[in-house]
Image (spheres, grey):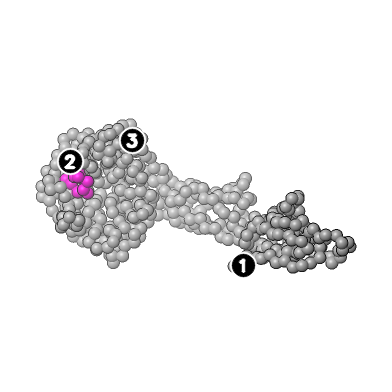
Amino acid sequence: MFAFPTIRRRAAPALFCALALSQGCSNDTAPTDPGDPVSSGALRLTIEETGTRPDTNGYEVRITLAQAGPLVRPVQQGGGSLLLADLPLGQHVLRIEGLAAHCSIIGIHPRTFTVEVGETSTLEVRVFCPGPGAVLIKTVSRGRDVFMGGYHFAIGGDSTAVVRSIGASDSLVIGEEDLPAGTIRFVRLNGVPDNCWVDREQPVLLRPLRGHTRRVEYFVVCIPRSSQMAFEFANTVYLTRGSEALSLSFGLLAPGSGPSLSPDRSRVVFSTPGDFLNEGPGLILVTTNGSGTGRLTSDDDPVFVGPQAWSPDGSRIVFWKSEQGSALGDIYVMNADGSGETRLTHDGLNASPAWSPDGSSIAFCKGRVFDVIEVDFNVYRMNAEDGSGATEIVKTGCDPAWSPDGSKIAFTDFSLFQPYPDLAVVRADGSGVVRLNPAGVISQQQSSRQPIWSPDGSQIAFTGGSSVIRIWIVDFDGIAFGEPFAYRSGGAPSWR
């Protein structure tokens, strides 16, 4: 690291040469009358240029003089020493101008210096001109229906652009000599299919390379082309087919959360704590094509649905009402138009219902209170018609979600007594638990909750994180999990 240069002064006679750095200075001075008062000083400027790619065109030293016009001197390649004599007294400003784009000034710039009577001040400036830089473009594609033909990207400059092809999981290095002209450039990834999400803002602005390799990574996550996902983000419910997300609740004057997408993907039901029209908590139904919306319930207590709230034929909805602000309540079933409400549980300790694919059962989360502050959660299943035959499936778990074939249930697992919950899968009869992290080592970013299966049953999406909430996706082959990967910002996914 270079130390900041200092200004040193020494007594010297007035000097009267001001030449380019490559020329040096003569020792000859014009005769002066010893009786004349000294009213000027001098500056010895040293420019040290380092790096493997010098500025071959040269540059300039510009000094803004106090109470006088600017003084400009050329600098040849390599730097050197320059004596500026007969400068007026006072404080002046020195700038280096016209440097090549890959060069930079090390340390403070512009610089100030002071000229005193009869003295020569010294000033050192260091210029760094490194070798050629490069841009590394990297793509990582995950998920289903990834277009293996790859993408293409554009690097734009002031007036031109370079377009190159790149694979779905590939990397390319482009040297600075092959980049478009200009000091400000951008990178944009194009050709990404509609069922894929690019996890970074575009375009990406590139800072001047200055001999460095700038790394630009794109993480592309694809979901099956025929599927859709509803999710919540910032108190708004969205629907996505992979790339763009359509807001379903923003224009309703009501915040929304916990959406559930109907089996035919034509409707979404979600919860609201109340709206700006002074209507209280309830459930809102919207069509995915924007043709209609309406309230299904209006209650004094909060009302919630889970990601699999719909019956398989789309005719009924299961939900739960929370009493007095508690996370638990009782489970109800109603027709999809809000009529025919039927209560299935009666102890006020239930939540997160999910309808089985065959329509016969409802899995749900049952709480067990030990004292005022401690509640144990367990996964149960019951008859979907009348709530009878409630049977425990999992101890210490919640947020059940049925696999599409009805053979397994994914749930949020609290059994390992870790700071953050885990994701697990169990057979529908309660046997054969498989955990995402069998050793119990769970990162804060991937603490899992609110799972939901992909339509083909090969993946599970879940909400992960604490300070930054994201939707994560993980492969599941029926025996073991893959490595989770981040999808997009948001939570509480419902995948059909």
Pick the front one: 114 or 446: 114
Mark 2 sits on what residue? 333
Pick the front one: 398 or 372: 372
Residue 157: percent from left, percent from top? 60, 48
Determine the image quadrant of residue 335.
top left
Residue 455: percent from left, percent from top? 30, 48
Pick the front one: 256 or 83: 83
Residue 291 lies within the magenta run: no
- The amino acid on which the numbered mark 1 sits, given as a three-letter code, is Ala
Whether residue 42 is visible to the viewer of this picture, yes or no, is: no
- The amino acid on which the numbered mark 2 sits, given as a three-letter code, is Val
From what the image shows, is residue 192 above or below residue 86? above
Mark 1 sits on what residue? 3
| Label ID, residue 375 | none
Magenta stretch?
320-331
Labels 1 and 3: the sequence-earlier one: 1
Kind of element beneath mark 2: strand
From what the image shows, is residue 352 above or below residue 290? below
Residue 31: percent from left, percent from top? 89, 62
Marks 2 and 1, how far apart at CA: 74 Å
| Label ID, residue 253 | 3
Kind of element beneath mark 1: loop
Q: Residue at x 26, y 46 (%)?
A: 307
Q: Residue at x 73, y 64 (%)?
A: 121
Kind of element beneath mark 3: loop
From what the image shows, is residue 474 above or below residue 27? above
- The amino acid on which the numbered mark 3 sits, given as a three-letter code, is Leu
Residue count near mark 3 (Cα–Cα under 10 Å), binned few <14, some 14–19, many ≥20:
few
Q: Nearer the viewer, mark 1 or mark 3?
A: 1
Split into 4 quadrants, where in the image is the C terminus?
top left
Q: Residue at x 62, y 55 (%)?
A: 178
